[in-house]
Amino acid sequence: MNSKNIVINPILELTGVGIEFPTAKGSFKALTDVNLKIEKGEMISLIGHSGCGKSTVLNIVAGLLQATEGGAVLEGKEVNEPGPERAVVFQNHSLLPWLTAYENVELAVKTVFDKSKSKAEMKEWIEHNLNLVHMGHAIDKRPDEISGGMKQRVGIARALAMEPKILLMDEPFGALDALTRAHLQDSVMEIQKDLGNTIIMITHDVDEAVLLSDRIVMMTNGPSATVGEILKIDLERPRSRIEMADDPKYNHYRQQVLSFLYEKQRKVEPLTKPTRGKISAAKEIA
Amino acid sequence: MKNKFTSLPNGLFNRGGSITDDVMPVWMQETIKAIMLPVAGLLFFLLIWGTVAQNIDTSLGKFPGPSQAFQQFKSLMTEHNNEREKEVAFYQRQEDRNVDRLAQDPNFQVKVRRYTGKPTFIDQTFTSLVTVLTGFILASIIAIPFGIMIGLSKNLYAAANPIIQLFKPVSPLAWLPLVTMVVSAVYTSDDPLFAKSFVTSVITVLVCSIWPTVINTAVGTASINQDLLNVSKVLRLKPMTHVFKVVIPSSIPMVFTGLRLSLGIAWMVLIAAEMLAQNPGLGKFVWDEFQNGSSNSLGRIMVAVLVIGMIGFLLDRMMLMLQRVFSWDKQAILR
């Protein structure tokens, strides 16, 4: 069924990636035999239950974790340390709280374009990127002076400003409310249309995955998690969330992801004892 | 004309509740609280002090109460002023004499002799302050970089930890003889910039007060948010940029906690060191008064106790103000 997922000229290639963590009770195998090829300009979502190792895959690509088996190759070069060509947008924005929005982006720009850009060019580039995420009005605000969604926008601006070959987003909108999330999703789609970034995004949100992605990589449950299925999303761009809601094709994709998550990879977690509920129920009866 | 107090609205008194309930704005109530409660606490303390003091008889007379202490404070101030007048007079006399002699003999080499009066209470206080700040600043200059270093490296921390834990609880009194002997042996210059006693006190203060800053800086540095460390890694920040842009701002609150603890310890240590080593300062003042044993001595020592406490408090407030200036998180409640 993966025949339609043939990628001819991948920018990023994961081959037989596995990782083991040493623990007190012996080693724990989190990932095994993850294979994935990503084309330039593609938007990929990684979806799966929590604890399935989505973040681990992303961290291996970012270079923050080292695979114990196999490896990741970006444009013919093996990834073995973090670097700005694989910029990360972290879940909780991770802006330096003592720097303003401008200074946060500046820190990235200064390290990446240390020699290639003049001071004036840097300033222009920083402002350009902040405007791109519609944060031009809050350039001199510190993270604690702006909302969660705005912080995440600055986080995205910082990542974009590094001109990464691939943009890694670790549940970028997970901590935001639904309306803010929708706004940011639209922003990301817009930016990706204009700049043609290659993006890997981790998400828990089925709608988000279907709406944004070219392909959805669905992961099996851990331990020894791996790629379960890859779903190609063949929907016209630009996609509008309102039209999509009524699109049978969209709903079909949605159904496929849901079926993977809740039928094939149903996660059986032991429910915590509902003691409190029982007591209050008993009281009500009494 | 009517007294304005009688023309207050009746509403003020027409119910049993407190007056402040419906008339005073909230800020005024808060201000009154903020002033009255500490004042009430102080008055209560003075009352207890006064009553208890009356009932304690020592070989030097009754234990000094608040009023005796205040008397002694005034007399210490008078002594200080008298001493200053004498000093001014001394220099004036000397200058007059030199002018006279120059007039008689143009080849006369003018010599200016320093006034060698006994240091007053204020002089001693001032000496103590200079000594404690010197020791504390030197300790901080060593402690902060050292703390950052051991905070950044787990291995270095593991290596340094036993030394820190070993020396942290050592009392200044144990160090003092060693420091005194070492300073006497090593610090031998014909024209010393600082007095030996000053160097001894400074080193003792340094050795004892360095640890809280080291430990707190190390903990602050080691507990930086993992996400921020990841940001630094992804950006491939140079080590120095990493330290100055990420590590130091992030550990500033802990560094200041350490600095405040260190300054408090430095001040306590200094008084003990001065007392034992006969280094000039407030500690020596207390010791001299104790040896002097006049009927005023206990009162004077009580003044010294209060002044020592007051200065310790002011030093801590000073650090708090510095912390407010340096802290990036202006919303944080600092106390």
Image: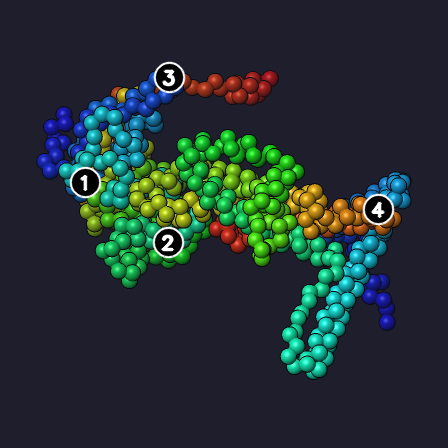
Q: In this view, does A115 lie to the left or right of B82?
A: left
- Distance between the alpha carbons at the discs numbered 2 and 3: 44 Å
Numbered circle sitting on residue A141: none
User: Sequence order check: which comes first, mark 2 or mark 3?
Assistant: 3
Residue visible at 33% across and 46% down in the picture = B238
Identify which amino acid the numbered label 4 is placed on: Gly
Identify which amino acid the numbered label 3 is placed on: Lys
Q: Which chain carries label 1?
A: A
Q: In which quarter of the image is residue B210?
A: top right
Identify which amino acid the numbered label 2 is placed on: Glu
- Distance between the alpha carbons at the discs numbered 1 and 2: 30 Å
Tags 1 and 4 both on a single chain: no
Residue of label 4? B293
- Distance between the alpha carbons at the discs numbered 2 and 4: 65 Å
Q: Mark 3 lies on which chain?
A: A
Q: Are marks 1 and 4 in contact (CB under 8 Å)?
A: no
Q: Residues within 10 Å of mark 4 (few under 14, many from 20)?
A: few
- Nearest the camera: B47 or B161? B161
Q: Is residue B161 above or below residue B108?
A: above
User: Sequence order check: which comes first, mark 1 or mark 3?
Assistant: 3
Point out the frontmost of discs 1 and 4.
Answer: 4
Residue of label 2? A103
- Nearest the camera: B332 or A152? B332
Residue of label 3? A25
Q: In this view, does A89 lie above or below A267?
A: below
Q: Are marks 1 and 2 in contact (CB under 8 Å)?
A: no
Secondary structure found at label 3: loop
Residue visible at 60% across and 51% down in the picture = B133
Tags 1 and 2 both on a single chain: yes
